[in-house]
Amino acid sequence: MLTSPETAGVVYELNGDVAWTGSDFANTLTDVLGRDVHYESVSTEDHVAALSAAGLDAGTIGFLTGIDANIGDGLLDSSGNDLSRLLGRPTTPLADTLRTFV
């Protein structure tokens, strides 16, 4: 939690400077790894079936698929530079972040 007298009640959106989609993520992984990575969007029903087959309980499945449906509906889409301002620098590009893990 970030708190100070100057920012009481302020809500920060801590997103990166550049938004990316699942396809963008897969394409960036392809570049970083040097092999094909594909993104496939699935319906909520197919997502539920896959998570059920993996052995997750109904509560966890509902939670995860609800979050993913909200993301698909754009509820996490935002633009702004709160994180960059708080860091005092631009956010790290996706490709640079992924390269730290390979």
Image (cartoon, rainbow, N blue to C red):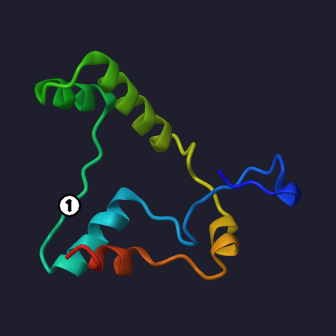
88 sits left or right of 6 in the view: left
Residue 28 in the image: x percent, y percent?
Answer: 30, 74
Residue that carries the numbered disc 1 in the rendered image:
38
Q: In the rendered view, tell whether residue 23 sits above or below residue 30.
A: above
Residue at the spot 36% in from the left edge and 32% down from the top edge: 64
Residue 93 in the image: x percent, y percent?
Answer: 45, 78
Query: Is label 1 in a helix, a strand or a loop?
Result: loop
Q: In the rendered view, tell whether residue 35 sits above or below residue 14.
A: below
Residue 84: image quadrant is: bottom right
Q: Between 87 and 54, which is closer to the camera in this rendering?
A: 87
Residue 85 in the image: x percent, y percent?
Answer: 70, 73
Q: Between 96 and 77, which is closer to the camera in this rendering?
A: 96
Q: In the rendered view, tell whether residue 102 sits above or below residue 46.
A: below
Q: Residue furthest top?
A: 58
* Three-letter residue code for mark 1: His
Residue 58: image quadrant is: top left
Residue at the spot 15% in from the left edge and 81% down from the top edge: 34
The C terminus sits in image quarter: bottom left
28 sits left or right of 81 in the view: left
Residue at the spot 27% in from the left edge and 39% down from the top edge: 42
Q: Residue furthest front?
A: 4
Residue 20: image quadrant is: bottom left
